[in-house]
Amino acid sequence: MKKLRIGIIGCGTIGSALARAVERRFSKHAHLAYIAELDRPKADRLIHSLKAKPLLLSIAQLVKRSDFIIEAASAKISGGIAHSALKRNKEILVMSVGGLLASFSSLERILKCTKGTLYIPSGAVAGIDAVLASREGKIRSATLITRKPPAGLRGAPFFKTSKIKLERVRKETLIFEGNVIQAVKAFPKNVNVSALLALAGIGPRKTKVRLYTSPKYTKNSHEIIVEGDCGVVHTRTDNMPSKENPKTSALAIRSAEALLTKVFSRFKVGT
Ligand SMILES: NC(=O)c1ccc[n+]([C@@H]2O[C@H](COP(=O)([O-])OP(=O)(O)OC[C@H]3O[C@@H](n4cnc5c(N)ncnc54)[C@H](O)[C@@H]3O)[C@@H](O)[C@H]2O)c1
């Protein structure tokens, strides 16, 4: 069988880990053919470290030439990339999930006629399997409670207008409460998990988010509470922040690797 040509957009913490995983673990099925990255030296370092020597392309060229695209760049561009990949009947895995929400209704229209597939890994949270199963019945409410150390929130647009100053936070503080649409605008790099929960469950308007921070936190923690016909799904995941990027949990990288394993495997466990 012909190997899939993989293209990775964004070669930061997640993208470079997945590039190495494709080379190490999925070489029977796939070949890392292309990358797209704004930071040229970073791209060169990654290419140098890989046997595959992927070509550095523009995003448009990468989407055109790849069979399977991995987006690990930014919520600002993930929606547009998903649209163009699916219009070209490509397979695409999206990490910047929050970026899909703004144009999700047009994405749903494309999904009805594409021969491609949109994959969204479970990321840094446990329980998406049970939320999907609950949705087959009725879900009455869905809430995400996220706890992140200040370093994992720094730079978020929320702080441009908020009176809360992260460096002055001394104890556990509720810094944000709202729905997922508001959360992804305020924290586009920090609450992809909320967008994921919304897409798996009852949508971004009805899914609630509470975000806490404290200098005492050492982990990125996510609690899901979903109530419906099947009962209550209540999970908590305490994640080690990745060494390279404290906004990103190590489990999010593993979750994308696990999804790729599932894509290439004849043995698929879990909903
Ligand atoms: N789904 C999840 O559970 C989850 C978890 C963590 C992070 N994320 C998201 O995944 C994405 C990647 O995370 P990361 O930790 O690897 O981030 P990172 O900052 O380490 O890497 C992102 C890389 O993308 C590049 N980039 C940004 N915009 C680009 C563009 N327009 N074209 C080409 N390259 C571009 C940057 O230069 C950088 O090298 C982020 O959007 C992040 O919010 C999702």
Image (cartoon, helix red, strand yellow):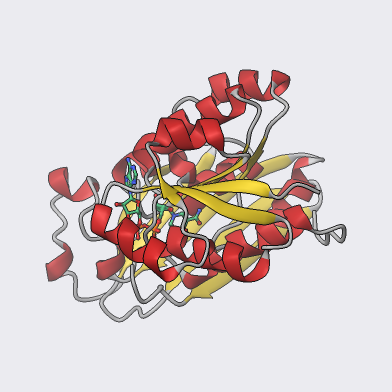
**Residue 149: image x %, image y %?**
31, 71
Q: Is residue 220 left or right of residue 129?
A: left
Q: Residue at x 22, y 45 (%)?
A: 157
Residue 202 sits above or below residue 56 on the image: above
Q: Residue at x 18, y 70 (%)?
A: 169
Residue 79 sits above or below residue 12 on the image: above
Q: Pick the residue in front: 137 or 55.
A: 55
Q: Is residue 181 in sight in this rendering?
A: no
Residue 229 sits above or below residue 111 on the image: below
Q: Pick the residue in front: 5 or 132.
A: 5
Q: Residue at x 58, y 69 (%)?
A: 236
Q: Is residue 233 left or right of residue 242?
A: right
Q: Pick the residue in front: 117 or 182.
A: 117
In the picture, residue 235 is in which quadrant? bottom right
**Residue 50: image x %, image y %?**
47, 67
In the picture, residue 258 is in which quadrant? bottom right
Q: Is residue 88 in sight in this rendering?
A: yes
**Residue 80: image x %, image y %?**
44, 29
Q: Residue at x 39, y 50 (%)?
A: 10
